[in-house]
Image (spheres, coloured by chain):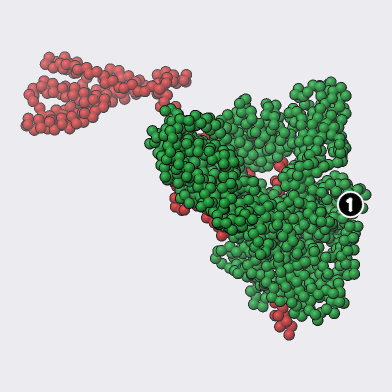
Chain colours: A green, B red
Amino acid sequence: MPPTGLEPARMNRKKGDKGFESPRPYKLTHQVVCINNINFQRKSVVGFVELTIFPTVANLNRIKLNSKQCRIYRVRINDLEAAFIYNDPTLEVCHNESKQRNLNYFSNAYAAAVSAVDPDAGNGELCIKVPSELWKHVDELKVLKIHINFSLDQPKGGLHFVVPSVEGSMAERGAHVFSCGYQNSTRFWFPCVDSYSELCTWKLEFTVDAAMVAVSNGDLVETVYTHDMRKKTFHYMLAIPTAASNISLAIGPFEILVDPYMHEVTHFCLPQLLPLLKHTTSYLHEVFEFYEEILTCRYPYSCFKTVFIDEAYVEVAAYASMSIFSTNLLHSAMIIDETPLTRRCLAQSLAQQFFGCFISRMSWSDEWVLKGISGYIYGLWMKKTFGVNEYRHWIKEELDKIVAYELKTGGVLLHPIFGGGKEKDNPASHLHFSIKHPHTLSWEYYTMFQCKAHLVMRLIENRISMEFMLQVFNKLLSLASTASSQKFQSHMWSQMLVSTSGFLKSISNVSGKDIQPLIKQWVDQSGVVKFYGSFAFNRKRNVLELEIKQDYTSPGTQKYVGPLKVTVQELDGSFNHTLQIEENSLKHDIPCHSKSRRNKKKKIPLMNGEEVDMDLSAMDADSPLLWIRIDPDMSVLRKVEFEQADFMWQYQLRYERDVVAQQESILALEKFPTPASRLALTDILEQEQCFYRVRMSACFCLAKIANSMVSTWTGPPAMKSLFTRMFCCKTCPNIVKTNNFMSFQSYFLQKTMPVAMALLRDVHNLCPKEVLTFILDLIKYNDNRKNKFSDNYYRAEMIDALANSVTPAVSVNNEVRTLDNLNPDVRLILEEITRFLNMEKLLPSYRHTITVSCLRAIRVLQKNGHVPSDPALFKSYAEYGHFVDIRIAALEAVVDYTKVDRSYEELQWLLNMIQNDPVPYVRHKILNMLTKNPPFTKNMESPLCNEALVDQLWKLMNSGTSHDWRLRCGAVDLYFTLFGLSRPSCLPLPELGLVLNLKEKKAVLNPTIIPEAIGNQEAAINPSSHAQLVGFQNPFSNSQDEEEIDMDTVHDSQAFISHHLNMLERPSTPGLSKYRPTSSRSALIPQHSTGCDGTPTTKPQWSMELARKGTGKEQSPLEMSMHPVAAAPLSVFTKEPASSKHSDHHHHHHHEHKKKKKKHKHKHKHKHKHDGKEKDKEPFSFSSPASGRSVRSPSLSD
Amino acid sequence: MADTAATAGAGGSGTRSGSKQSTNPADNYHLARRRTLQVVVSSLLTEAGFESAEKASVETLTEMLQSYISEIGRSAKSYCEHTARTQPTLSDIVVTLVEMGFNVDTLPAYAKRSQRMVITAPPVTNQPVTPKALTAGQNRPHPPHIPSHFPEFPDPHTYIKTPTYREPVSDYQVLREKAASQRRDVERALTRFMAKTGETQSLFKDDVSTFPLIAARPFTIPYLTALLPSELEMQQMEETDSSEQDEQTDTENLPLHISTDDSGAEKENTSVLQQNPSLSGSRNGEETVIDNPYLRPVKKPKIRRKKSLS
């Protein structure tokens, strides 16, 4: 239908017609991909593609295709050489290196660049000129065959090579390669129309080493040896029209397992893992059965393949008729914890086979339908497999997640509509990235997008019933499968593409219901609803007066108008009320059914018809209300903050049968640390019928309550006696029974309880000795010899428990953290950690869970000042070659160290890894962790924040990550977190820079900025500094008073003052200030050290300062200026400061002290100039605990 | 002569004294009797008119006398027992003497002879106090069927069985304690050894020996060690599988077991797994039936086919 052009197409879409017009002036019907040669050694690929296209317009003279990374040798159209141009604007987003460094600018440029090659807009990186000889041919709209020879050398994205460096052939080494990427990323490894909306049939050929297997989409037609018999060629045919973005490949020396239940399903794994593969996939057929049953539709492809590979890009990636999984999902029968996770991954991938692979989407704005449906049917599978409790728990979890994310970032829009008008151009202006393209999306946003999509599907189900919902799915699938069996007809194949309008039309056809308001609220609009509820009971009218307020002004919120279900549990039973939330109505009167309580003996009926006895003594005698729930079915994407009395929460926890309600009440009870709450929680903990996850969260709540009640708490530490009763021997209560994890509920509880117990604190805010001993005993007596299951997760959690028990070290002196002053409890903990970590080397646990926990625990010890803070250990574990979980845990510690110790060196190390690590997932994860735990943020001054870093990150996102959308978006996220949307504050203002250059090449503006910078920086330390400081705030404030008095009695020492005057003046002198961009924030520090060198008598003073800065290393003054203020308040002393001199110099203290005072006085003078920000700094110089004290006290006694 | 006797005597007494010193009460008694007999022999010799006698002859005579008297005693005992008595009577002695060819009638006269020498009674040495045997507990009285004349029961400790071997520790607590500390010791020793013999890392810069961490060593194929169960675990699994019944006997675990025997889907699954090998095993036989493209043989290159065609 060439004459229809683009306009009618858009009209069609609006009308909800299922017709789909391609944005391209041609239609692809068939594509051949042939990879002749794969070289693992050189990591290169050579091959060709052949696209069969039908022009749809007469004057087609240029054909745009997608291709990245590939080197294209030759393009022929119908055997005629064709000229081509390759232009990829995304390689470098911002050209001509302007000094622009603001993220707004970048995001716009990036969106524009992605648009420029977006296949959905008819664009592409590769532009092929149709040879003039063919123009006539084209005018007749006859078929064109485009043959492109290409090669790929050391691809950085799209295809990932894993080549272990051991002896032997590639097959023996377990070398493999697989395709990967975020959304449509097929263009990274062969030229194609990389769109989900351009379907065609496929012929795929891969010639590989004879010992290797090539797994790809569609049916394996035959495998043929090459002439030299050293290689074989795998021929695949995919007759079902499929988008290029759903094409995948995995080549490796795989072990092959034909599913014993379904012979058309084949599983592949890396050598030696076959037993694990057998176990892991033994369950898959049930998932198949489930989906086929609910969708009343056979699995659309004639075969299915699962491939488990190492260094996976994502845990699960679904492609047409095959899914690629991380090999780390494989597990043996002994592993409990991984089993449900892996099964969920399998089920997820299978759901996406139906919706996502088989049924594709028309455009990016229809993505939510696919993610929504696949997520929704996956949810149904969860409900069937793990039960309603698990399902509801999961829904609540997902709801909480999306609500938290939207409130934080300001909304997730499922169905963005673009191109209407300019004002609508950016429907997500609150975000630092464009949501026009999948490739510009932050990964986190995309995750949340998927989460919201399936929740909205559930809302639709609530409205139209599950039966209709499944009918709609079935309709979509059967239309698609009819279409797929047709020979090429452009119109028919578009039936396999889903669009929002088509989907909605199906819904209205099938159900006859109008869900437009729902769609408008949740799909066309971003934001969630925030309810605040409170109530009063009017006794005279016997009416419950419910007040429901909404916050719809904060970012990420929206106004809700419509029905809202409220469930009221009264004495006479549970009653549902549907309130109409309207514009101005806040108050809702709900008539109550029961008149207070007349017959006390009566059992109380619950929602589920069950009747229970309750002890009603706790409740208000005048009110028949037991508890109230707002939107109990989670049929609004909302956050509810509801106020009701503590006893109501307790009743809700004990008697409400819905796990979500139980969890809500547990959360609410945290605010009511009373014996009654304690009892309610303990009862829940003991109740075996109660859902195990509820019991687990009750543990943590109980720990919190116990801590709030610490002064009135009676009896043994919370949960101890319970644990003893449940898991310890009857005869010797201090010894835990030999492990038996046959009951998973008890297993999870047994794992969790000690972790929660370790959070208990006594009046001194220390973990009670009894608890620590208890946990150590658990570890000591842990005996897994007779257990059917591995106890690696259990042991790992015991280490987590040990880590949880660690409290900040009380530093008596500014001493270096050594073994000698190690707290005896910590010594015991370290003993265990050392042993566990070492045993892991000899007897590694599954997924090295124990190593991971040990590394985390060591970081906790470091952070709390028990062990010298040092990233070296973590860096060694973060190296390539360790198991990925270990690496991530180690990297997390390094990221944390970078933040706490403000280490420029480690930050550079991390950035270097982001650029060079062989594993894409690790690179992504580092960025992700840096974003979550940033070394500094945009509102904060930090010595790390300098121009070099800005340039580095800018380069990273501008050009360094062009091979991986996800990575680039991660870099953008990090840049946003560190510097915000506008120009980073640490850069010199461009205009001023000019002025300065014109002048004397010295930064004259600096005197006003430096002190502020310093002040900010100090302020910045405050929040990030360790909680332990809090404990020292009070002593400090006292001491400052003392100090003020002291200052009056100071003898003046002119020389001393002038010396310091000089020093303090220096930052504002022009001479120094030209170094400002890198070092001025630290300007004070070098002076400190010079002070240190110059005037030995002041050492104690300086040493305190330095200790606070805690670099832990000996540093020359120069170095100090480069890495200043690594503010680990607890950490180590610099070597130089004369802690040993303290004793020798007692007689000097008086004198010294006064000098010190003078300096302070001095600072005070300057403070006025410096905008008073120094003040923030001062507390710090004494916050370093007792040394300040020890220095001071002699002088006081004098 | 006297010299020789003296020397002999000296020699004899020397050896004797040597033996005397290491005497026991029985020896003492023996010596005392012998001394008395010697006195008797000597007085008889004096009676017979000898003024002196060689030591050896005295000894010989003493020996003879002793033998004679012993014989009388033995014989008398036999006679007395012959008549079912335990105490010899005079008549027993008489019969004995008669039997030995001794004219009993001469005996009174001989006893009353005038020139007889009266030997002073040997000095009453205190009955050597036999150290009282340890009496542990009361001697048991005879049970009624044993006549009272029978010797008393010995001390109870001589026949009451008191087993002295150390009881094997069967206390659950101690066992667990022991197993735990044993394992811990082994693990610690092993890891320390490994740490000593290889590279280490330390949490403390100043001290590398107290908490030595075996250095992290990257693997070439990290997922293998991470995913595959260790040999120990495999072994354990086999053991627990085979001894599933034994496991139930662990009393401490028993209640837990009972309550969880009907555990959920997971268990089902594990049983599925256990079936699995057999399933796939049985399928191995009919593998030819399975039409899976990945199991099909790899075809020969077409060129060859062409050749055969041509």
Q: Residues within 10 Å of mark 1 (few under 14, many from 20)?
A: many
Question: Visible in this render: residue A848?
Answer: no
> Quadrant location of the N terminus of chain A?
bottom right
Label 1 sits on a secondary structure element that is helix
Outermost residue, front side:
A999
Question: Visible in this render: residue A720?
Answer: yes
- In percent of width and height, residue B76 lies at 29, 23
- In percent of width and height, residue A1068 lies at 53, 47
Judge by depth and name the residue closer to the eye, B205 or A280: B205
Disc 1: host chain? A
- Amino acid type at circle 1 is Ile
When the figure is inspected, residue A1000 is found, relative to residue A813, above or below; the finding is below
Which quadrant of the figure has residue A36?
bottom right
User: On the rendered structure, is B136 left or right of A741?
Assistant: left
Residue at screen point 57% across, 42% down? A1170
Judge by depth and name the residue closer to the eye, A592 or A689: A592
